[in-house]
Image: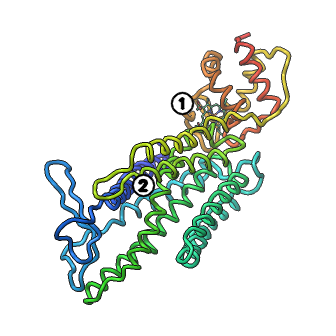
Amino acid sequence: MRFSELLDVLFRWAHLIAGIMWVGNSMLFNWLDRNLEKQHPGLSRLSQGKIFMLHSGAFYDVEKKLLEPGEMPKTLHWFKWQNFTTWATGISLFVIVYYMGKVPLVDPAVKDYSNAVAIAMSVGILFCAWLLYDTLWDTIGQKNPRFATIVSIVGLFASIFAFTKFFNGPAAYMQTGVMIGTIMTGNVWMVIVPSQKGLVEATQSGKEQDASLSIRAKQRSIHNNYLTFPLLFIMLSNHFPAATGHPLNWLVLISVMIGGAGVRHFMNIRYRGEGKELVKGAWLAPAFAMGAFGIAGLLVITRIQLHTGPVVNGPVSFSRAQEIIVQRCMVCHSTHPTDDVFKVAPNNVKFDTPEAIVLMKDRILERAVRQRTMPLVNKTKITDLERAELGAWIEQGAKLQ
Ligand code: HEC
């Protein structure tokens, strides 16, 4: 295994583990908040509610509250390293895969410019996105959160559209994911943790805790909560070239994000505290509807055929199809690839023998002719006519003469 591939495996694995821990925590605490019992006898003055839970072999008796002046417990558990590890491994993975050249950020068919410039843009976007978002919510967001929400959503969708015009499909999706992950991490380290520290310091110096700090932290925490489902989809998106490689890939992503955040919303409002739930029709049905909206985005938009390339009517022989594959595909897809990056056939797809080519005909049709997501960022410069010839050969029965 090559060193870069080893790094890829290690960081991806760690990223997944840390991500599960972080998102799992976020879900659990959010669920706790929404299930608190606020009318419990014997609640303390600063209590926000109590909850009893059963897990493993015993009961958990948890109270959410602010602390009285001087009431600092000896041991306090913070939840911030799961987030940091998820972000740090995620950024590293982005660098390993996209900045170090395994997959370029640029696709000449989308926009032909230097990959170094694309990397500089990608880094710049991450900083600017955080600064803009944080400033928005520190100013307008304090007085008019509804307006700030609209501006944030419009800004996010506009960014997605722009990314797909400057980066190749999978990279544009990942740029969006890394941007969201960076904003979420900024929320934890620049807002939530400092607010928590403010609460702790007040208590230690015998003062009342400032409830506005608590509210500020909660606001950002809720943003993170809504972003989890869309972000998790982006993490998986590179397995779905039909979505990332489609000319309307930005619209696919936007509809999946609306659907995902919508499902999250109805899961959130399901609980009304005191162990009560909304009636099923008020949360389950709309949650399904939002899920269906996201799925429709995947199903309907990815079927829209936008390419009107050349049409091949005459018969195409196997030797012509093989010629194209040798020239445009086997650089990567053979027993001994000659590509500068791929030293092993990607996905173990090899076109060494006629039989191997025929066996893969459906995937060749899908990736090289319909989706046009192969060759990878058209590194070998296949032409539209060659794609059409490949398609014609397969549609004429993929015969070996
Ligand atoms: C520069 C290297 C490169 C070239 C050239 C290339 N591929 Fe690929 N191919 C990849 C990589 C990387 C993957 C795995 C990632 C993915 O699926 O997008 C892959 C995966 C595939 C897969 C398996 C995944 C699936 O969806 O079934 C098929 C089939 C495929 N390529 C077909 C082709 C065809 C046909 C050509 C030529 C027209 C071609 N490739 C040219 C790099 C290349």
Q: Is there CB contact under 8 Å for labels 2 and 1?
A: no
Q: Earlier in the sequence, mark 2 or mark 1?
A: 2
Query: Mark 2 is on which residue type?
Result: Ile
Q: Is residue 383 left or right of residue 217?
A: right
> What color scheme is it?
rainbow
Nearer-the-camera pick, 63 or 166: 63
Marks 2, 1: nearer the viewer: 2
Residue name at image x 70 percent, y 11 percent? 400
Q: Which residue corresponds to mark 1?
A: 348
Q: Is residue 341 visible?
A: yes
Q: Position of residue 322 (x, y in %)?
A: 72, 21
**Residue 98 vertical placement versus 392 (above, below):** below
Say the numbered circle drawn on residue 124. Answer: none
The quarter in which the C terminus is drawn is top right
Residue name at image x 41 percent, y 64 percent? 84
Q: Position of residue 242 (x, y in %)?
A: 63, 36
Nearer-the-camera pick, 52 or 349: 52
Q: Is residue 386 left or right of residue 358?
A: right
Q: Secondary structure at mark 2?
A: helix
